[in-house]
Image (cartoon, grey):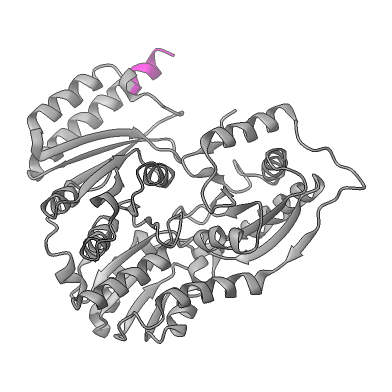
Amino acid sequence: MALFGTDGVRGIANNQLTVSLALDVARGTAAELDSPAKVLIGRDTRVSSPMLESALAAGLAECGVDVILAGMVPTPALAYLIGAMRADAGIMISASHNPPEYNGIKLIDNAGRKWEPERERRVEEAISSGRWPKPSSGRIGRILHHENSAVLAYHRYLASIFAGLLPQGPIVIDVAHGAAAATAPQVFQMLGVPTTVLNGEPIGEAINVGCGATHPEHVRDAVLRMGASLGLAFDGDADRVIAVSGAGRIVDGDEILYVLASHLDRQGALVNREVVATVMSNLGLERALQARGIRLLRTPVGDRWVAKTMRDCGAQLGGEQSGHIIVKQWTETGDGLLTGLALLAALADEGMDLSQAVSDVERYPQVLTNVPLDGPLREWRSIPGLSELVEQAKAELGDEGRVLIRPSGTEPLLRIMLEGRDVERIEQWSHRLQAGVREALESAEAQR
């Protein structure tokens, strides 16, 4: 039974992700914790989040685990608070950038990191076998409410890092009707930065809908209309951020990595002059870093792999094109608000605006398409003829392009990405590869 994908358990609430499943995940999690244990639970604004919070809290308490409810907080805030509140683990209820009908359950350890796949597999095994601490009248966990004090501790933590380091020009932020509504406006106010907030109401039905990090054009329009110095767009659980320059340039995670890496390098603080990113990061980032003598290390898609590689090699900076950035100096996980603050601080220290800071990054065109699958597909190489097509595409693109095919870790999709200087050529290859996948799937369906 495989419940965990690349980012926890995820599905449509009350359909794939039910109260019953949440209870079982809590029980399986309890089986992985030494007794006595204390678990911190946070959630985003989705309508289903309080329902799942109640189920998780009940399942943990039933197994003798004490529960602290942090309320509506970003995922990175929960990661910080686990250590600050001396909890043994944390559970975040969020489907990140997904639409409102989805939700997810993410398990986080006492260092603020997502649980390793092996540990998640043991939770799955505990659920399958019913192997968890059995209910006992003498061992019922307590459920404690710290909704207000928890988020205030996170506010103070970020403000203490960046006090006096930020420019005082006006900015625009889009909190996507999500968890950043409880943190971003308040922290910028504490730091004295004039801020215009878009989509600031914590409305679960509207989370990520036409707003936030997946729709940064709205922040861009507001920045240009108001003459703001910069814009920041967060996703539903605020673990990622996309920026917009005062001139209206949308700056994704790759370019944010470049700005932060360049700044750390000038300070002599970029260990081994290495930055970690995934296979999805643009070739333009790699070339721009190379020009500065900085090496880019690539990992599979998923922030957990970025974090693991950073630990293995000692890198201080890593992230994803989506805006999920890890600044090791302060955190073990991606934090959209902290990243936005670090970006502003770096620009202030360098005395330049965001457009200037990313001017050396020449982005290579990318074509990304998704082919729906009827069921999970973990090995695309088994699709007849597709490996040969991929090798042909790679040979034709050479050093000026890349081909990447991978199954989604959260949805029944096969993702096809091509990158290169020649847009027409990569679009042609994208169509050929999509057609090859669809023909193979239709053939397989006809043979059923």
Please name whichever residue, 275 or 224, is drawn nearer the observer in this view of the structure: 275
Q: In the image, 258: left or right of 290?
A: right
**In the image, residue 170 above or below residue 104:** below
Residue 287 at least partly seen: yes
Q: Position of residue 324 (x, y in %)?
A: 38, 55
State which quadrant residue 361 falls in: bottom left
Q: Which residues are magenta?
A: 441-448
Please name whichever residue, 397 or 356, is drawn nearer the observer in this view of the structure: 356
State which quadrant residue 165 falls in: bottom left
Q: Position of residue 172 (x, y in %)?
A: 34, 78
Kindly identify the residue that appears in the image at 24 percent across and 61 percent down: 268
Which residue is at the far right? Answer: 137
Q: In the image, 54: left or right of 9?
A: right
Q: Position of residue 224 (x, y in %)?
A: 23, 79
Residue 211 at least partly seen: no
**In the image, residue 99 above or below residue 158:** above
| Residue 1 painted magenta | no
State which quadrant residue 401 falls in: top left
Kindly identify the residue that appears in the image at 55 percent across and 32 percent down: 118
Q: In the image, 386: left or right of 95?
A: left
